[in-house]
Image (spheres, rainbow, N blue to C red):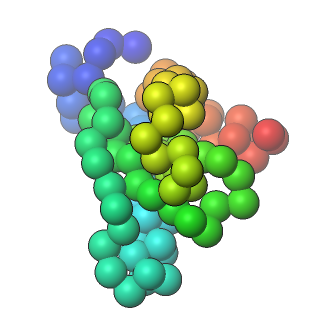
Amino acid sequence: MPGPGKYPLGEAIWTAPQDIAGLAKLLGLAVRQRGIPKMRAGEDNTIIAEDPDLDTQAAAVGRYIHVRPEGFNDPDVIKHELRHAGQSRALGPAMIPVSLAE
């Protein structure tokens, strides 16, 4: 899969289902917190959000990475989730059933 920026429209269409799901999860977090969650930009156009409500240490949904507060600045956790975000870009819509199987 070409790197980000080479075919931005094609990549946006290819990753749209999982990116929409990740954005919906982020908006749900904002509603629950009644405000904008702590976020930062990650590598490869990802957005990393602190999510205290997660029942796991971290979860990547498309380009949106949700991380428990204790893992927000942990480079090992972020690196692991960035690999999942890369898988999402490579697999496109097929990433959804792969994620559900975990």
In this rendering, the answer to whether 49 lies above or below 81 is: below
Most distant residue in the top direction: 2
| x and y percentages locating residue 19 in the rendered image | 42, 49
Which residue is depicted at the point 31% across and 29% down?
A: 43
Horizontal and vertical percent position of residue 36 = 31, 73
* Residue 1 visible within the image: yes
94 vs 29, nearest the viewer: 29
Q: Up-down: is 23 above or below 33?
A: above
- At 70% from the left and 52% from the top, the residue drawn is 56
Name which quarter of the figure residue 102 lies in. top right
Farthest residue to the bottom: give it. Answer: 34
Residue 53 in the figure: left or right of residue 44: right
Left or right of residue 65: residue 48: left
Q: Is residue 18 visible?
A: no
Q: Is residue 51 above or below residue 13?
A: below
Position in image of residue 92 (x %, y %): 50, 32
